[in-house]
């Protein structure tokens, strides 16, 4: 287990963190749709599609970095890993934008209504629904930012780099 953890790069850890934040954000989104309150209703299929593809891309990054290939296969794998590392945060950002656009009018209605109707609008269920939506925005945003940072680091360690590190130790 210790060798497995040593073999990982910072981008692997960041991709895992992005996956965790994206997964939590997706669960928050689904719970926001199911819980009582202002935002209870049908699920936006684009947010679900973008989230699932981003999660699958992040899983692909995490799994494919564990294999070492040589030659032409390595070049293809490097290209696929780079593409997945870029696609995941882009889809998370797109999902977050759709999530925000679905909730913006409702949040303005809940928090920005006239004072004479605030008691009718700002019920505990509506406020909890609005808070959950904001938490979902935050998780999607953090997942996307961490994914963007992860894409700037090298994903797989080269075999020659591992050999050089072991000889130096």
Image (cartoon, rainbow, N blue to C red):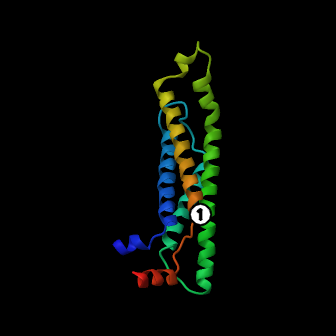
Residue 141, image x, y percentages:
57, 48
Disc 1 crowd, CA 10 A, few/some/many (<14, 14-19, 20+): many
- Return the residue found at the far left: 1
- Where residue 38 sits, quadrant-wise, is top right
Specify whether residue 78 is in view.
Answer: yes
Residue located at (34% from left, 72% from top):
2
Q: Does 81 appear above or below 46?
A: below
Mark count: 1
Residue 86, image x, y percentages:
63, 62
- Where residue 43 sits, quadrant-wise, is top right
Viewed as shown, does residue 161 lie left or right of 169? right
Element type at mark 1? helix
Viewed as shown, does residue 85 lie left or right of 7? right
Specify whether residue 1 is in view.
Answer: no
Residue located at (52% from left, 16% from top):
119
Q: Does 48 appear above or below 168?
A: above
Quarter the C terminus occupies: bottom left
Residue 15, image x, y percentages:
51, 61
């Amino acid at each position: 287990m210790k060798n497995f953890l040593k073999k990982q790069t910072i981008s692997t850890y960041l991709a895992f963190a992005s996956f965790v934040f994206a997964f939590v954000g997706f669960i928050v989104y689904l719970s926001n749709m199911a819980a009582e309150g202002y935002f209870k209703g049908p699920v936006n299929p684009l947010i679900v599609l973008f989230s699932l593809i981003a999660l699958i891309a992040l899983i692909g990054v995490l799994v494919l970095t564990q294999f070492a290939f040589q030659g032409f296969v390595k070049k293809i794998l490097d290209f696929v890993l780079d593409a997945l590392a870029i696609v995941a945060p882009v889809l998370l950002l797109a999902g977050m934008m759709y999530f925000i656009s679905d909730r913006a009018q409702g949040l303005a209605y809940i928090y920005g209504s006239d004072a004479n109707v605030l008691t009718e609008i700002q019920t505990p269920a509506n406020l909890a629904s609005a808070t959950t939506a904001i938490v979902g925005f935050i998780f999607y945003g953090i997942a996307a930012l961490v994914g963007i940072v992860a894409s700037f680091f090298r994903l797989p360690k080269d075999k020659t780099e591992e050999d050089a590190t072991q000889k130096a130790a």
